[in-house]
């Protein structure tokens, strides 16, 4: 154990108890609530995740309530939070806990890892906060705090780095109050030791932080460059019939937005004009099913929807028809479907005064 461990953990916990935000999941050790909050806060800021947490707790007070809810309902409630595989895993795990474990979450790290969508970080958080077990969490905030304080330049997204930081965090954790320590180091990273413009001059650790003393705060943590962002080009066909109906399709198979609904989609290798759209086999097949009266482009400048490893350059084509298809839905009912936020934003804007 690093000689500085007791100093580091105690000073950190004192800071946390004096400065922590009052968040609902911090007022309980209920594993259902802790699990729900940790799944929601993956890749998500607290301010964005908090309203969703409150909505889910209100809709599903117990894990059994979440387990018995229809999947479409869960996805709809999750809409806008992104990374929808989390919602599907959340629902699957709720069913597993409710139906196979009598509504009781596993009380140790090893068994928590067996739950769908639960990895090292989430299992450590639940084990420490709900069951007072000394299992250290390591997320982006923890990487940043430890890499700067100890001056570690091992890339955090390398196998060696993940192992090194996990071991260090495990050595530093306060064995008497592991849950408080884990929440303290995450809070410190989220609010004080931030990615840019940290207030290092007034930091509680500025007398012992290696990065501050060596003027390397901006260089740490080190991360191996990821692959270039993939550019994709989406063309949505927004069907408008004379009796105010449209067409939605559910996404299936692997890839983004599994089981969410969207307008009929044609993906191309670049931006296209209406004449090019009409020549595409997918469009010609589609046009044989409906009587098209008019085609117009809603947005000349593509809406760029940014995901972690890809950018979706999206244009919406308004297809006015004289009739409707068998699978059409009323425009007034679109909001009842679980859709990607990209679609939700368009619907809100386009149909506001429709």
Image (cartoon, grey):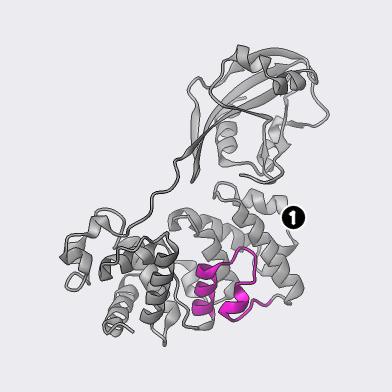
Q: Is residue 148 left or right of residue 98?
A: left
Query: On the image, which quarter does residue 289 sit in?
Result: top right
Give the quarter of the figure containing the C terminus.
Answer: top right
- Residue 65 appears in view: no
Where disc 1 sits, the SS reads loop
Residue appearing at x 72%, y 66% in the figure: 95
Residue receiving disc 1:
70
Identity of the residue furthest to the front in this view: 160
Towards the viewer: 72 or 287: 287
> Residue 123: x, y in percent?
55, 72
Query: On the image, which quarter does residue 19 sit in?
Result: bottom left
Identity of the residue furthest to the right in this view: 326
| Residue 83, placed above or below residue 315 | below
Q: Is residue 334 left or right of residue 154?
A: right
Towards the viewer: 197 or 114: 114
User: In the rendered picture of this protein, how many numbered marks are placed on residues?
Assistant: 1
Residue appearing at x 69%, y 42% in the figure: 336
Towards the viewer: 269 or 14: 269
């Amino acid at each position: 154990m690093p000689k500085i461990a007791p100093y580091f953990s105690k000073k950190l916990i004192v800071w946390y108890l004096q400065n922590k935000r009052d968040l609902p999941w911090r007022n309980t050790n209920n594993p259902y609530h802790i699990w729900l909050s940790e799944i929601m806060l993956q890749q998500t800021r607290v301010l964005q995740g908090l309203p969703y947490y409150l909505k889910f707790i209100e809709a599903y007070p117990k894990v059994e309530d979440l387990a018995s809810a229809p999947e479409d309902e869960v996805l709809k409630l999750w809409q806008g939070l992104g990374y929808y595989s989390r919602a599907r895993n959340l629902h699957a795990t709720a069913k597993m806990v409710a139906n196979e474990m009598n509504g009781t979450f596993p009380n140790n790290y090893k068994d928590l890892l067996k739950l769908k969508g639960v990895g090292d970080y989430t299992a450590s958080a639940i084990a420490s906060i709900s069951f007072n077990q000394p299992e250290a969490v390591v997320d982006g905030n923890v990487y940043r705090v430890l890499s700067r304080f100890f001056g570690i330049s091992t890339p955090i997204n390398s196998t060696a780095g993940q192992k090194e930081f996990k071991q260090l965090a495990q050595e530093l954790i306060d064995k008497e109050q592991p849950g408080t320590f884990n929440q303290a180091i995450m809070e410190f990273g989220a609010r004080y030791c931030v990615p840019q413009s940290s207030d290092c001059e007034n930091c509680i650790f500025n007398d012992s932080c290696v990065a501050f003393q060596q003027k390397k705060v901006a260089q740490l943590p080190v991360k191996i460059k990821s692959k270039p962002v993939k550019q994709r080009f989406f063309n949505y066909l927004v069907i408008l019939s004379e009796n105010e109906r449209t067409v939605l399709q559910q996404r299936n198979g692997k890839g983004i937005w599994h089981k969410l609904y969207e307008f009929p989609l044609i993906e191309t290798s670049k931006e296209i004009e209406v004449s090019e759209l009409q020549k595409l086999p997918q469009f010609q097949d589609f046009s044989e099913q409906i009587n098209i009266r008019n085609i117009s482009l809603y947005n000349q400048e593509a809406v760029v929807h940014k995901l972690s490893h890809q950018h979706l350059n999206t244009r919406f084509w308004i297809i006015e028809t004289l009739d409707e298809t068998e699978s059409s839905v009323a425009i007034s009912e679109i909001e009842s479907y679980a859709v990607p936020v990209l679609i939700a934003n368009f619907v809100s804007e386009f149909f506001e005064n429709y």
